[in-house]
Amino acid sequence: MKNLPEPQDIAKILSEIKDPETGFNLLDLGIVKNIDYIPEDKKAIVYVDFKRRTPSCAACAPIAWLVQKRILDELSKRLMEYPDIKKVEVKE
């Protein structure tokens, strides 16, 4: 799999996504825990793990969902130009 984005390319995309509450980018807030590639059927799945800013806050679930959706939408849109990317998955 040669046609994959570099980790810094993914980090750049994530740095452009803003937290809906604070307006700061997700990397500066430390929300993104891990970025990984998992091979599947001669292509790769990009996995992004993130965490809530306030893990014990049950009322924050809708905000966490919105962050997850923003990450998934933006990465899916921008990484699908790479032929060896099968899909993007985002997990909390």
Image: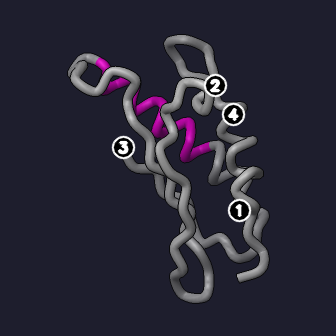
67 or 2, nearer to the observer: 2
- Identify the mark nearer the N-term, 1 or 3: 1
Q: Which residue is mark 4?
A: 15
Q: Which mark is residue 92?
A: 3
Q: Nearer the viewer, mark 4 or mark 1?
A: 4
Tag 2 near tag 1, CB within 8 Å: no
Left or right, 18 with reference to 58: right
The amino acid sitting under disc 4 is Ser
Residue 1: % across, % down: 70, 82
- Disc 3 + disc 4, Cβ < 8 Å: no
Give how far across and how far down residue 7 sits, in percent.
69, 56
- Name the dominant secondary structure of the magenta segment: helix
Secondary structure of the residue carrying numbered label 4: helix
Disc 3 on helix, strand or loop?
loop
**Other-residue count near label 4 (Cα within 10 Å), few / some / many at <14 / 14–19 / ≥20:** some
Q: Which mark is residue 25?
A: 2
State which mark lies toward you, 1 or 3. Answer: 3
Q: Quadrant of residue 36?
A: bottom right
Residue 47 - label:
none
Residue type at tag 3: Glu
**What span is in magenta?**
60-73
